[in-house]
Every structure is written in C-alpha cells, then in structure tokens.
Image (spheres, grey):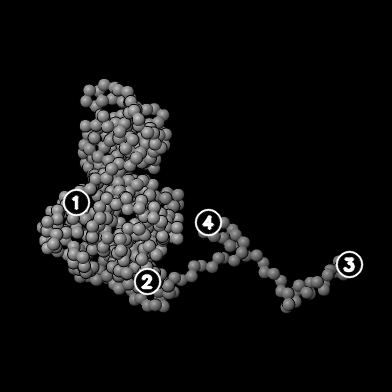
Amino acid sequence: MLRRRLGTWPWPAARRGLSRLAPPAPAPVVRVDSNNVARLGAPKPGPRPRQLLSLPPFPAGADPLPGRKVAPRHVTAVSWVKHCFADVPQEVVQAHFNKRQVYTECSDQEVSAESIWCRKHHLKKIKHSEVMEPGMRIHLPVSVAEAEIKKRYETIPTATLHPNRDEIEYLKRLVIYKDSAILVLNKPPKVPMKGNLPVHNSMDVLAAAALSYGNEEGPKLVHRLDRDTSGLLLMGRTRESFTRLHWLFTSIKLARTASQIWNTACESYVQRYWALVIGTPTESEGVISAPLTKVLLDDGKAERVILAHPSGIDGAQEAVTEYRVMGPTINGCSWIELRPLTGRKHQLRVHCAEALGTPIVGDYKYGWFVHQRWKQNPQPDFEPFTGEPYKLRRPEGLEVQKGSVLSKVPLLHLHCREMVVPNIAKFLSNTGEWHDNGTPWSKEKPNLLRFIAPLPAHMKISWNIMSSYLV
C-alpha cells in the first residue's frame, strides 16, 4: 500500500515547484502590533528621516530680538523662529508648530548634519508658547526656509483672485475709515477671518485682493473676530502700523514708547461689544476675571475653550472682561455691553456662558442646552424697576428676517460696536519713520480715533423690539 501511494504522488509537479526557476512561496509572517493585534504580512516600513534645519542657539544677551521690546524671559519659540525667518509668512511658521514639526534639544549636545539626518541625538517636540532659554537650539524642516515669498493675493484661488466690480464695490462699502496707516471695516457676520485650503472667501484674502489701494502689500489683520461675530475690524496698511497696533491689542506695556503723547493715547484704547444674552446676570455690572484654557475634542479635530481650573496647572491664560447690563429682560433675553481687557479666543462667549450663566443668543457651541430650555420654556417678561410683567409687542411694520430673535434659529448676537485707538498715522511718516511728538505736518490731527459700527440687520430687528424699554 505504501508503494501504491508513492506511485500516485506527482513527482514532476513537485520538482517544478522546488526548482530554482520557481522557488516556493514564503510562509506568511504574523506580526503583532502595539495593540496586541495579530496581522499578516511584513511590518510596515518606518517613517523616513526628515531633513531638518538648525537655528542658531538662543543668545543670552539683554536684547535677543533687536528692534522689538521683548524681555529675554518673554521670548517664545514661535517669536524666535519668526525672527530668524523674517521673510517667511507668519502663517507658514505657525503651521509647522501646529503640525508638531518643530524640535529642540539641549545646548550641551554636539550636533552635526549626519546626526540630524540619522536622528542619533535626542530631539523633543516644542510648543509655540514655550519660553526660550539661553543656549536652546531649535530644529525644523527645511520646508520653512524653502517657502516662496509671494504677495498674499498671488495665492488666492482663481475665483477670488480677480473680484468683479460689484464685489470690489461691496468690499469698499464695508470700509468706514481709511488713512495712510490703517483701515477700519464693518465686518458682516458669516465671513471667516483667516483663509486656508477649504476657506477661500475670508476677510484677509478679500481685503488683500481688493483693498490694497496701490500698495505692494495688502492690509493685515491687527485683531480677529469670530466667523459669526460682526462689527469693527482694524487692519494695518504698513508693517510698522500693523506691528505697533498688534502690540497694543496684546498688551499696553508692549506698545509704550518714549513719547508721552503716544503712551497717553494708548491708555485710552478701548473696545466695546454689544450682545444679547439669554437671561440676566445677577449683578447689573461688574468685572469677570476667569482664566481660560483649551481642550481638544474628536481626536484633536476640534477644540473648545473652557474656564480653567483654579490651580492653574492646565496652561491657563488670563482673561478679564468688564460688563454692564443695558436694559430689562424681554422674552427671556437682555442686552449687555462687554469690554474685553484681554484678547483671548472666544473670551466673551465663554465668559457670558460659563462665568455669568447667560450665553449669547445664537451661540450654540457654548449655550446649546440653554437655548433648548429657552425655546421650550420661555421666561416671563418683567420690568426690572417695577417688577410688573408686560406682554412683548411686535412693532408695526417690522420686517421679520431670518436670524433675529424672532427666528426659530437666531444668528449670533455679538457685535463689536465701538473702538477707540490711537491715531497712529500722526506718528508715522510715509517712509515708515517713527516720530515721538508726531510728524510736523500732522500736529493738528487728533491723538485718538473713535469708531462706531451700526448693528447688522438681524441684531437691528432684535434691538428695535426692545428699544422702548432700554435705559
């Protein structure tokens, strides 16, 4: 029987399978990854070494950034990189920090091109807000240095690169003030501030395309407003005006110079917002001092700003806001005036929703549950001085528009209404030279500029409904 089985074995086929021309297929490799999951196939190749560029060590002198009034202990990593790459757009540098592609190391380690390529030395990722210390060395991809320097409007998509006459006229109608140093616009809601790949029609892109007025560079944003927030938007037309006003919006101490006239004007800087909130704050006026911090959601795809823990160990940022209640509660809502003393992201929205417990109407990110209760269980309307209830009456001839407080889905009721800033054009010449006492030909100009922006359509309807009860 053994011979019979051997005789039936296909020896020629077996020999062909074991021949040199057709070697046997390798046995499947079973690999176990870090999550203890068995997978077939060879392990995936690791990432290729990235070509990094080394910056000079951070100096130990008293003036690490010449031309900028920043103490050595206040210089952050992103400031040092932007100083080393002055000709590279700031958004390119910030993008590398956001992607966690910037590294640092100890200053006592020897670094060579070969060691950087092979990553034989220890590198750790560094955040943009980390304070630089003397001797620190930063490494980042060479793509930062290879970024082409172009005008901002040269990178705009074709759809908005050449706006037509109607679009240009619309943008120019938004301008409420223009001089040689600044532009002031009344930003409409639903317009984003910064453009990126999926967002083309942003305010900075549109302004650079249509509001250059013959300058080589378009105006730059001095501060930001949320996408759904409307109101005054300040833009610098020159690099010097943008830098000094950006210092002013960051901290008054950074904007001070040897000029007493300029310093006095900086102390008068103010921003006032009008907002319609659900409910009424406990106190009619006060100061909110509540630090803020950011948390990541959905695996880092989204972020949310919350009140920081009192211990301050979670990277909290100081945030201070003054507020004043402007009128009574009508249909469960109240008008309040907000004055931010610091410029944090979503500061006014978080302070209203979490610190005061009165979220802004239309702010579904920080007041979703309050909106549901407000729509389902409307609060009784009362007059705050007499306490007598009254019935909400709709003014005659009032046009109902989507987004007002009468709508089922109201828009965000937050508007930057008033702004007082120094008249920086008085201190800057046409060549960018700074004059402490003002230029000789502009001494008669005022030291301060005050702007007021009218309310957008949806907030104007809500205002007209409650105007007869305001104080």
- 432 above or below 457? below
- 228 above or below 327? below
Q: Quadrant of the C terminus?
A: top left
User: 139 or 423: which is nearer to us?
Assistant: 423
| Residue 1: image location, x then y, percent | 89, 65
Residue identifier under label 2:
145
Q: Residue at x 26, y 25 (%)?
A: 383
Name the secondary structure under disc 4.
loop
| Residue 448: image location, x then y, percent | 16, 52
Few, some or many residues within 10 Å of mark 1 (<14, 14–19, 20+)? some
Q: Distance between the Cα atoms at labels 2 and 4?
A: 38 Å
Few, some or many residues within 10 Å of mark 2 (<14, 14–19, 20+)? some
Residue identifier under label 3:
4
Q: Earlier in the sequence, mark 1 or mark 2?
A: 2
Few, some or many residues within 10 Å of mark 3 (<14, 14–19, 20+)? few
**Residue 35 circle label:** 4
Q: Are marks 1 and 2 in contact (CB under 8 Å)?
A: no
The picture quadrant where one finds residue 204 is bottom left
Q: Amino acid at mark 3?
A: Arg
Q: Earlier in the sequence, mark 3 or mark 4?
A: 3
Q: Are marks 2 and 4 in contact (CB under 8 Å)?
A: no
User: 232 or 304: which is nearer to us?
Assistant: 232
Name the secondary structure under disc 2.
loop
The picture quadrant where one finds residue 81 is bottom left
Q: Residue at x 35, y 76 (%)?
A: 111
Q: Are marks 4 and 1 in contact (CB under 8 Å)?
A: no
Q: Amino acid at mark 1?
A: Leu
**Residue 449 circle label:** 1
On the picture, is 194 further left or further right than 246? right
Q: Amino acid at mark 4?
A: Asn
Name the secondary structure under disc 3.
helix
